Amino acid sequence: MMGRSRTRATIASTLLLWIVVIASPADAAADDPWEEVSTPNPGTFGSFANELHAVEGIAANDVWAVGAFDTGPYLTSRATLALHFDGTSWSTVSTPNPDGAGTGVDIDRHLLFDVEALASNDVWAVGVGESIDQLGALSVVLHWDGTAWSSVDVPRLGDEIALNSLRAVSAVSPTDIWAVGSYTLYEGFTTGTLTLHWNGSAWSLVSNPCNASEDIVAISANDVWAVGVDTCHWDGSSWTAIPNAADPSNGYVTLLSVSASPAGDLLAVGFRSISYFSGYIYSVRIERWNGSSWVTDSPNTTGDHLDGVLSLSATDAWAVGSNFGNPLIMHWDGSTWTAVADVPSPGDGAYLNAVSAAGSDLWAVGISFGSDVIGRNLALRSSGSTPPPGSDIATVSGIVTGRGGRLISGGIVSWTGPQTGSTTTAANGSYQFTSSAGGTYSVTASVVGCRRTVTSTVTAALGQSVVLNFGLRC
């Protein structure tokens, strides 16, 4: 499907000083505002009580989002979740939770990671069912026939303690559908990419030598792409590994989402990590297929990783993810990636997993965290109903870390220039200040008990957001 994501690792920021200037949405085609749309939250326990991993729309009044919710305070209290938007509001639609009967695996924990909507009566969702006691896992595939969701049997690799999990699904047609994920066989400790194909009547296993288990996009019967640590291409007869774009810093690159426009404009996003002291420096990764190889599109974009991408044309694409605890939405206008200002960020933090189009609307979904430590579904929509805010202010924001990537809480960030002021960093090390006067600022980061400070000069024009991160060596 187009532009979604699934699992995410907990990423601790361990950044040296770096700056990224982001053009205002008004300067690009990304000038439609995003608004939060209320969603049901059936889960009531834990930081991941409710979470949305994927969204897909058939029309503006026919949109699906899938994920999971906690049904209680135990590890086994996890169930599949499907929400439907009818043009007015989101509602919960009942979904089955296969128990693994007849497989030898007693499934007691379920999650959905992706959804593909071909028609109002032909929607697929994939994920995993886990056995906490047996340590085994089975792929979960659900189908919507216009009336109800039902579970569909799929083949698996290994015995009852093997791990099979599907992460993504994409369709060429109702009789040509692909799904990818991962498998682990404890006998021999073998791991690899789990690849399934639907021919209109049954799912079958397809050999895939690549490590590309995160996402898949099916363009045609002989043009299918899967991404992950590797990139892999299906030519109609076999899967072949294709190198990702070279990383000059020898960083570790993982692509989490891939999307193709109707004209075949192929984009993939994810993250790169570089070892730094006892931790890692994380940054977003954007790659573009130029017809013969993958090339890096924008290596220095703000944020720690991108989880979903939507390619609409050569001059119109969207990517979503996380900007160090805040939701990140970016737009491509054919020449520049632009971070959208004023993305709704309810609660004490949020991130976005997926982005998709539905009619004239754009949807992005994920999870937000409240002060009560209860995770809530997050759904954002852009429909271009009002002009973009933020064009009359300059914004500077970032993260302050200490030695080893420790997040500095209560640090002091002060600035002088056209306006003067100071602020303190939040629990996650983040800070932000705005100014009604654009220009050059001298910004200093410090923390009580540390004799060393770091100062940097940055220029922020009105309508711009500048990311300025500090690494204190103490």
Image (spheres, helix red, strand yellow):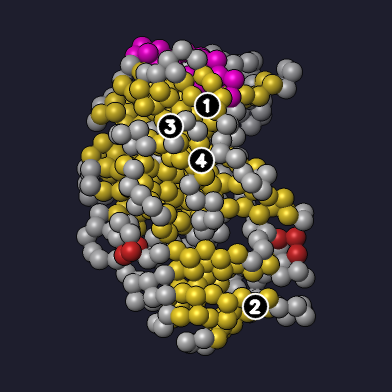
- Disc assigned to residue 455: 2
- Tell me: residue 19, above or below residue 285: below
The location of residue 436, given as percent across then percent down, is 40, 82
Range of the magenta residues?
194-210
Q: Secondary structure at mark 3?
A: loop
For the point 52% across and 70% down, which residue is it?
A: 397
State left or right for residue 300 relative to residue 311. Answer: right
> Which is nearer the N-term, disc 1 or disc 2?
1
**Residue beneath disc 4:** 295
Name the kind of residue labelled 4 in the image: Val
For the point 77% across and 70% down, which residue is it?
A: 474
**Residue beneath disc 1:** 232
* Mark 4 → mark 2, Cα distance in angstroms: 34 Å
Does the rendering let one see residue 301?
yes
Closer to the eye: label 3 or 1: 3
* Mark 3 → mark 4, Cα distance in angstroms: 10 Å
**Residue beneath disc 3:** 291
User: Is there a contact, CB below 8 Å, between mark 3 and mark 2?
Assistant: no
Name the kind of residue labelled 1 in the image: Cys
Q: Secondary structure at mark 4?
A: strand
Name the kind of residue labelled 3 in the image: Gly
> Which is nearer the N-term, disc 3 or disc 1?
1
